[in-house]
Amino acid sequence: MVEPSPAVTVATPTPVAPTPVAPAVGAGPRLRAIFGAGNHPGGFANGGPIVLGMPMVDARRVAPTLFEHDPLRIAGLPDIALSGHPDAYGHLGSLSVDLACATAVDDVTAIWGASTQGYDTVAKAKLYFWFDPAAHVRGTLESPDSAQQCRVVLDRYLPISEVLGDAKDGFAWEREPVVGMSDADLVRVYGDYLGGSTTPCRSQILVLPPVEYDRTFTRVHLYCSSGNKVGSYELSLRFALNPAMKDDVRARLVKKFGNPMKTITRPTSEWLSFPPSKLVVTSRADFTVKDTVITVSRPQASAP
């Protein structure tokens, strides 16, 4: 089964003439010419009306030079190359800047300030994260251990605080309660998280943007009854790139639902069962896979 990537619903821009991305190099930190004057990740300074998540047909029209076979080179910055990248469903998934590793950390820190660091054990690369929480835009500097070329990636993300939230009667990411929804309800409310599916109880997947320290989407696995209504779901949050996220998620769940009624701790995992409210919530942190899976259902009705 092919799992969809997170779609972001944006207004389709008014057609305009193509805008070439050709920043001029001036005084100050050299990446200002590319990323503009802001002190947090956003877009490209002269990228025109290009927005992460917009349809690729519009992105190619307003900034065609970002999507040519060869990356866009910048006069005066010989090590810099700019590109745009579609997601799997026809939207603009990310923007990237390739640059020399020798100065990459200093270059990006000079415009966005201090970063949060992580490490990708699979890609064997140091990671540096910057965020704009209001715009839900993340900048990630990827610095491979054995390469001379680094990359800054701009993409969308959803903060953990907006996934979990504080209220005990639901999770912040839910626009309407998911448990109990039919296929038609899910399509109506969560159509942008379905990757085009009109039968989510069959595909069993909702896809949210990634959280702060995960480079792939946040997956919600649906479990539906024979009547095609959601009986429960699992929310998976990966902490491989930033192990401290495991403790952050645990602390947020305890604050939200209270101290666990039951805890089972093993060398490779920790399972928690929280006091029931309008929801029944458990979590399992897997120290090997490096993810926390939160299971959500409703209390079963008592027998008469």
Image (spheres, rainbow, N blue to C red):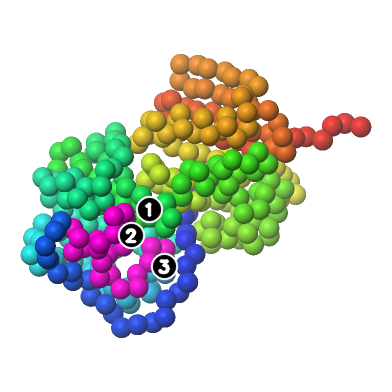
Classify residue 219 as left or right of residue 36.
Answer: right
The residue under label 3 is 54
Task: Say which quarter of the image contains residue 86.
Answer: bottom left
What residue is shown with label 1?
132
- For numbered disc 3, what is the local secondary structure? loop
Q: Work out whether residue 197 can be spotted.
A: no
Of labels 1 and 3, earlier in sequence is 3
**Residue 283 in which image quadrant:** top right
The secondary structure that most of the magenta stretch takes on is loop
Magenta region includes residue 47: yes
Q: Which region is colored magenta?
A: 31-54
Circles 2 and 1 in contact, beta carbons < 8 Å: yes
Q: In which quarter of the image is residue 95?
A: bottom left
Q: Which callout, 2 or 1, points at the residue further toward the start of the chain?
A: 2
Disc 3: CA contacts within 10 A as few (<14), some (14-19) or many (>=20): many
- Please, what secondary structure does the residue beneath circle 2 have? loop
Residue named by callout 2: 42
- The circle drawn on residue 28 is none
Q: Is residue 62 above or below residue 203?
A: below
Question: Dot 2, crowdedness within 10 Å: few (<14), some or many (≥20)?
Answer: many
Q: What residue type is labelled 3?
A: Met
Indicate the quadrant containing the C terminus: top left, top right, bottom left or bottom right: top right
Cβ–Cβ below 8 Å for labels 3 and 2?
no
In front: 61, or 38? 38
The image shows residue 250, relative to residue 196, as above or below, that is above
Amino acid at pointer 1: Asp
In the image, which is nearer the foreground, mark 3 or mark 2?
2
The residue depicted at 47 percent of the width and 59 percent of the height is 7
Disc 1 to disc 3, C-alpha distance: 18 Å
- The spot of residue 3 in percent (x, y) is 48, 50
